[in-house]
């Protein structure tokens, strides 16, 4: 059977190169990594294959891939060294070390006495030894200057090697493993960088699986974890459900970017309002403070940088459409929108809405306030289980002591309040008086 003649048709060669170039571009696009990174991966694979078949164990081989011609050039890298950076051994030294190693191996095989075992655990402090000279990766400075003038210790010489085109099965397998590993590393780095830039943003996701109490959300190129501490107790999570999640933290992980998500973080409210309210997105209206009890109620303080823009009206929207969209996304969580004020008295008064405030005694040094409200509105100001005053304290950063005043102008005594007073610390957000306890007889 006649052998088929090889053709040197430039058009055919050009076609193969075009296919190779398009394959590189396709990998870069699919994996979301730079084209230059793919070419670096190909060069690392070619260098590994060359070293496997034609190089030596201690050599450092570098490959340079030509994207235009599809060929590759190979170089041996040699570091320029001298007596201060490398240890030079004579043949006698090598022979002596070999003999000493054989004796040591023989001692290790022989049974040891109790004393020898105890002494064997002790190691003498040895000075750090400099690396030994290796002709495969090092070259002395005198020899290096014969090849290239002006080189100095620490420089790296690149000596071109003969190009090869035939590689064995093991070398090809080595190249394949290098490409797979390098592409995976580049893909992980690319995904980590992409999601790291989105840290602190709200993104869309679909619940992929649930393991125990941890919910895993598919974000597109990667998946994030919604841990129990970042979930909302009143929400029902099921596989296939679409939801917006707050990208809390992105960490580097060998298996890919470790993404921690949140549905309970207060900042998710800010980001959702940015999506729904153009004035917030543009910076005309600013959310100055947020206090939230996830799944139940939240208070936000807003301010306008333009006198002609109503901050509360902008957030509420026509017929409440804007704020309702945020409430729906948060599963019906109630949101109170109040106007920010630099005056502590006015700000605290607004934060305690819907209750009417009669007077406020503010201690700015201790950031504590005594607030008087009508006796019939004290329970409204405190809220269910102290929630209203607790959120107001968190929002303003002040500790608030509620006092109910009778129509005659006298404050209620301690034993007359009956679930109508509470003191809340802004730091702890917890009531100091237990409102749920029955009044003692």
Image (spheres, helix red, strand yellow):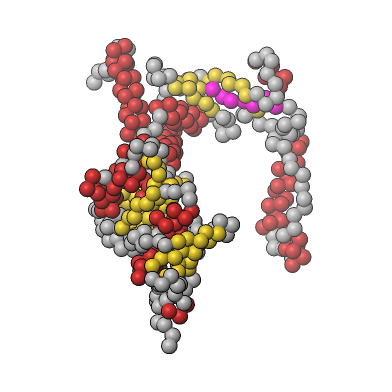
- Identify which residue is drawn at 27% across, 17% down: 4
Q: Quadrant of the C terminus?
A: bottom left
Q: Is residue 78 magenta?
A: yes
Front-most of residues 21 and 132: 21
Which residue sits furthest front? 408
- The quarter of the picture where residue 6 lies is top left
Magenta part, dominant SS: strand
- Identify which residue is drawn at 48% across, 66% down: 401
Image location of residue 431, percent across then percent down: 46, 69
Image location of residue 17, percent across then percent down: 33, 19
- 209 vs 82, left or right, is left
- 148 vs 440, left or right, is right
Tag count in the figure?
0
Which residue sits furthest bottom? 441
Front-most of residues 286 and 23: 286
Residues rendered magenta in the picture: 75-81
């Amino acid at each position: 059977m006649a052998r088929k003649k090889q053709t040197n048709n430039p058009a055919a060669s050009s076609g193969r190169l075009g296919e190779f170039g398009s394959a590189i571009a396709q990998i870069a696009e699919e994996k979301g990594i730079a084209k230059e990174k793919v070419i670096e991966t190909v060069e690392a694979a070619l260098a590994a294959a060359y070293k496997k078949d034609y190089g030596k164990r201690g050599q450092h081989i570098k490959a340079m891939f030509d994207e235009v011609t599809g060929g590759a050039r190979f170089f041996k890298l040699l570091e320029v060294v001298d007596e201060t950076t490398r240890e030079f051994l004579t043949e006698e030294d090598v022979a002596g070390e070999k003999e000493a190693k054989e004796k040591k191996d023989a001692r290790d095989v022989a049974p040891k006495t109790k004393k020898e075992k105890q002494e064997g655990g002790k190691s003498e402090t040895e000075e750090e030894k400099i690396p030994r000279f290796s002709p495969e990766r090092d070259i002395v400075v005198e020899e290096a200057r014969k090849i290239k003038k002006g080189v100095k210790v620490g420089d790296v010489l690149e000596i071109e090697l003969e190009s090869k085109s035939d590689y064995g099965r093991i070398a090809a397998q080595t190249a394949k493993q290098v490409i797979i590993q390098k592409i995976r590393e580049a893909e992980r780095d690319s995904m980590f960088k992409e999601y790291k830039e989105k840290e602190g943003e709200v993104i869309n996701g679909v619940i992929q699986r649930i393991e125990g109490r941890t919910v895993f959300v598919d974000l597109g190129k990667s998946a994030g974890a919604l841990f129990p501490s970042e979930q909302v107790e009143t929400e029902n999570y099921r596989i296939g459900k679409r939801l917006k999640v707050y990208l809390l933290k992105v960490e580097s992980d060998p298996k890919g970017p470790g993404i921690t998500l949140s549905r309970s973080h207060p900042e998710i409210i800010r980001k959702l309002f940015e999506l729904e309210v153009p004035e917030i997105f543009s910076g005309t209206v600013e959310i100055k403070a947020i206090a939230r009890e996830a799944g139940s109620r939240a208070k936000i303080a807003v301010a306008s940088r333009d006198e002609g823009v109503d901050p509360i009206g902008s957030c509420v929207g026509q017929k409440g459409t804007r704020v309702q969209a945020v409430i729906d996304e948060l599963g019906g969580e109630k949101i109170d929108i109040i106007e920010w004020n630099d005056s502590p008295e006015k700000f605290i008064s607004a934060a305690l809405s819907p209750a009417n405030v009669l007077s406020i005694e503010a201690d700015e040094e201790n950031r504590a306030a005594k607030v008087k409200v009508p006796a019939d509105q004290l329970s409204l100001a405190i809220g269910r289980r102290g929630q209203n005053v607790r959120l107001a304290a968190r929002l303003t950063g002040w500790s608030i002591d509620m006092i109910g005043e009778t129509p005659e102008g006298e404050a209620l005594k301690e034993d007359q309040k009956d679930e109508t007073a509470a003191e809340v610390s802004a730091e702890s957000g917890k009531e100091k008086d237990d409102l749920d306890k029955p009044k003692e007889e």
